Each structure stands twice: as C-alpha cells, then as structure tokens.
Image (cartoon, coloured by chain):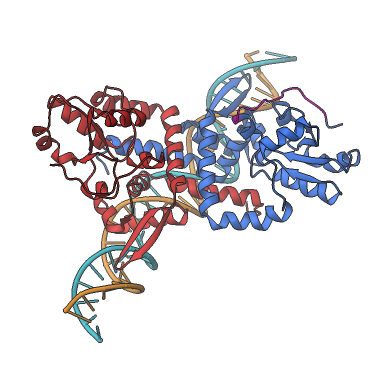
Chain colours: A red, B blue, C cyan, D orange
Amino acid sequence: MSIRNPKQALYEQFAIVAKAFGHPLRLEIIEHLAQGARSVEALAAKLGQPTANISQHLQALRRAGLVMAEREGKFVYYSLADDSVLSAFASVRGVAERHLAEVDRIVRGYFDARDRMRPVGRDELQSLMRDGLVTLIDVRPPDEFALGHVPGAINVPLGEINSWSESADTSREVVAYCRGPWCVMSFEAVAALRSLGHSARRLEDGMPEWKAAGLPVEMAARSCG
Amino acid sequence: MSIRNPKQALYEQFAIVAKAFGHPLRLEIIEHLAQGARSVEALAAKLGQPTANISQHLQALRRAGLVMAEREGKFVYYSLADDSVLSAFASVRGVAERHLAEVDRIVRGYFDARDRMRPVGRDELQSLMRDGLVTLIDVRPPDEFALGHVPGAINVPLGEINSWSESADTSREVVAYCRGPWCVMSFEAVAALRSLGHSARRLEDGMPEWKAAGLPVEMAARSCG
DNA sequence: CTGTCATTCAATAATTCTATTAAATGACGA
DNA sequence: TCGTCATTTAATAGAATTATTGAATGACAG
C-alpha cells in the first residue's frame, strides 16, 4: 500500500471525485449550484444547515474539482465546475434508479402517488408551447427563476400556487417544472393544482437539463401575475 | 436530520452509489469485472489482496447495486450489474481528468513520457485493420483475452512482448490495447516495442469501451505464435 | 482605524470506513 | 459422513469523515 504505481495513483484521484458525490448534502448542494452561482450563506439558508458545515462541504467539492469559487466583495460565489459534473451526477443517479430497490420503493411510495401521469418530454413541451396549448409554470423561488428559465414560463413559487390558481383558467392544461428530475417541488405543484381542479403535468426534467440540452433560456423576470 | 423527507431519502440512495465508486480498490475491481465475470479469489489474486478484503469490497459494491453475484459450484462469480455502471465510472473519470491537476501531473509524468504519440482511435483502427496495414495486439492476460477481444487481434501478454517481437516484422506498425483508457499495460507494451525498434501506438480505449461502442467481439482463442 | 459581516479555519467528539485476523458457512468429492 | 476448498462473517484496531462550536481571516463601510 505504501508503494503506489501510477495506475493506483490515478485511481485514487478518481476515487476522490466519486467520494465527493458520496454525501446526500453535497448532492443537494450540487443540485442547487446547477441552478446558478450561490454564496455560502445562500446555500446554507436553502439547505437549512449551519454556514460552517456548508462551507466545509463546499471545500470538499472544490478539492475534488466539482465546483469553483469566486470572491466578489464580502461574498464567495460557488458554481459548478462545468456540465460534466451534472452528467456524472446523472450517471450515478441512473445506476441507483436502475439497481437499488430502495429507490423504487421511495418513488412508488411518494412520487407516483402524487403524479400518476406520464411526465411531459422536452420535445413535447416545445410543440405544446408553440401551439399555445399549455401554461408553463416554473415553481422554483424567484431568485432561481430570474437567473434563467424556459422561454414562456411564468414564475409561480410553490407557496403561491393556491392564489395563482384562482386567477387561472381551469380548463387550460398546466405544465410544471423545477430544479431537476427528482426535485419535489414540481410534484407538489402538480398535486396541488390537480386537487384544485386543474389539469396538470410535470416536465420530465428540470432547468439544468433543459439548458444542458442546448435549448434556449430566457433571463428576464416575468412575474406570476 | 432525524426527519427525512423523500427527497433526502433519495439523495441518500444516490450517495450510496457514489460512495461505492469512492475507493481505489473498488474502482480496480470494477475495471476487472468490466472484462468479464470473475470469482472472488481470481480478483484477489489479480489485485494482490487478501480474499476477505476483496469479498467485503464486493459486497459493498453489491449493496450499491453495481455488481451481481452468481454461485456456480464452489465459486461465486461476480459481474457488473450492467453497462450503466461503466458509463458512470467513465463520467466520474471524465470529471477527474478535466478538473484535477493531479491527474494531469500523473499522466504527464508517467504516461506521456512513454507514449508521446497520438493514440489510435477506434474508427481509425478499423480502417487500418481492413487495409491490413497494422498488427493488433491485445496485451491482457490470456484468460481475459479468451473471453472476448477485438477481431483480428493476437494475444501477446505483457511478459511475452520481448520474445514475440523477435519473430515479428519490425517494419510493420503495431497497435496495442488492454483493459481501458488508463490501463498501464498498453503503455508498457508500446514503450517496450519502441525500444526494440518497432513502430507502435496505443488504441485510445480498451476492450470494455470497444464492446460498449457496439463493435464486434471475437471469442475464439488465438495464440501469440 | 474600527466595526460589521461573510467566510474559513481549528478543535472536538461521534460515527463510519477499512484491513486484518480468525472462525463459520456452503458445496463438492471421496 | 468427512475433509477440502471458496467464500462469507465476526471481531478488532486504526484511519477517515462528519457536525458542531468557537475563534480567526478578509473585505467593505464609516
């Protein structure tokens, strides 16, 4: 173990990267950073964790090359190193979805009960939008929405679903999306809208996947009037 | 931390998978299993580790859904759960190659010194082979070769490079490949052949990548005469 | 220069992971 | 049934990871 040939040295590096993905909190951090750059305290607030803890996890991620830090005044903004980080996350997620029975159990027990319908694909959504057949809502918080959203989407944060639905046309189908394929918010939104009499479905993925697919992103804010 | 919403429960599952990739020895095991099914003792022998240690790592991999076990008489054969495991490994490797300076250092310090030339791509190799311009050698051990190799390749294990080169035509270019893109054996083979006056290059990837690309695989043995 | 605020660092205890050793299981053949 | 062999399990000590706490750093405003 003391003598390390170059192959083992390489594998140690690969293991460092894999280990960085190997903690639920760090995966949540990655998902948040996939929406855009964030300061340490912003992340800490979103995740309900002490700042120091988030800071240490961020540095673990930085050592593994998954995120980068940029100082701006008093704040340090972290962001994902590049898209390969997200695709590695997706690969790991794929293995888990395929081979871990527990994932199946969680999804069946919680998500499927709330969203029995087939989610909308990206291509399908584009044609529905082109034909003006659906209302697309982005249920992420306004700050994440402002940094980039699907063109034509309106921002309806989860807490405002009920009040928004009153002013919305019940006969028009709604498509909701949020941070990623397993982001709970879009599930919750669809469940809430259906219980209010709307016809609602989820987009299969979230914002980062949309951007990664090379599809257009709108930056201007559009309120949830 | 005690109350776990379904999202956190999911992330814990994803983290289990990532953690399984997070140890150099387990990565080596995965690379070996990518060549084909192996018994515990066979792996232990290849990796120079005690059987019990390998057995425990294999069970960690099994719990994470990365490998599966099949009993056959006294032996238990382990194999990769499916190709998604290899592609997740490749993704992690990609992140490391892109963002860890240490990987660069190792590669420059060791590999590049031994293989300054551009490796041969898969498409390029196929056309070279079609035109009969190169000799393709598979430098893995005979048992791995027997379980599947690139059509037309001959098996020249690393230890037999010197004796083989005596009977080979020095003017004919040689292409070598082994287990994967970072497998040391093909680097060593190319270095040895060059020092013996041959013109030699590496194939950019190894056997698992060849198979994963959907290219044909030959099963019959072909000795290194 | 001083105070404030975001972030990092240092120290700690609790937990988890790892390699090793030795003993237990399970399957085969005599 | 008994012995052999491959594998698994149990037990252990040492190492690494984690969350928490409180103190240190670095940048800005006054």
Query: What is the tally of numbered marks visible in this picture?
Result: 0
Instruction: Residue B15: name its quadrant.
Output: top left
In the image, C23: left or right of A202?
right
Residue B122 shows in this picture = yes
Residue B45 shows in this picture = no
Q: Is residue B222 magenta?
A: yes
Looking at the image, which residue is at 31% across and 23% down? A118
Residue at the extreme right of the image, as rendered:
B167
In the image, B11: left or right of A3?
left
Residue at the extreme front of the image, as rendered:
A131
Instruction: Residue B37: name its quadrant.
Output: top right
Viewer-proximal residue among A133 and B100? A133
Examine the rendered structure and indicate whether residue B42 appears above or below residue B73: below
Viewer-proximal residue among A49 and B104? B104
Looking at the image, which residue is at 48% across and 45% down? A18
Name the magenta segment's main secondary structure.
loop
Residue B217 at x, y percent in the picture: 68, 25
Instruction: Residue A97: name its quadrant.
Output: top left
Where is the C terminus of chain A found, in terms of image quarters? top left
Q: Which residues are magenta?
A: B212-223
Q: Is residue B152 magenta?
A: no
Looking at the image, which residue is at 81% across and 48% down? B192
Residue A21 at x, y percent in the picture: 43, 45
Examine the rendered structure and indicate whether residue B50 appears above or below residue B105: above
In the image, A59: left or right of D15?
left
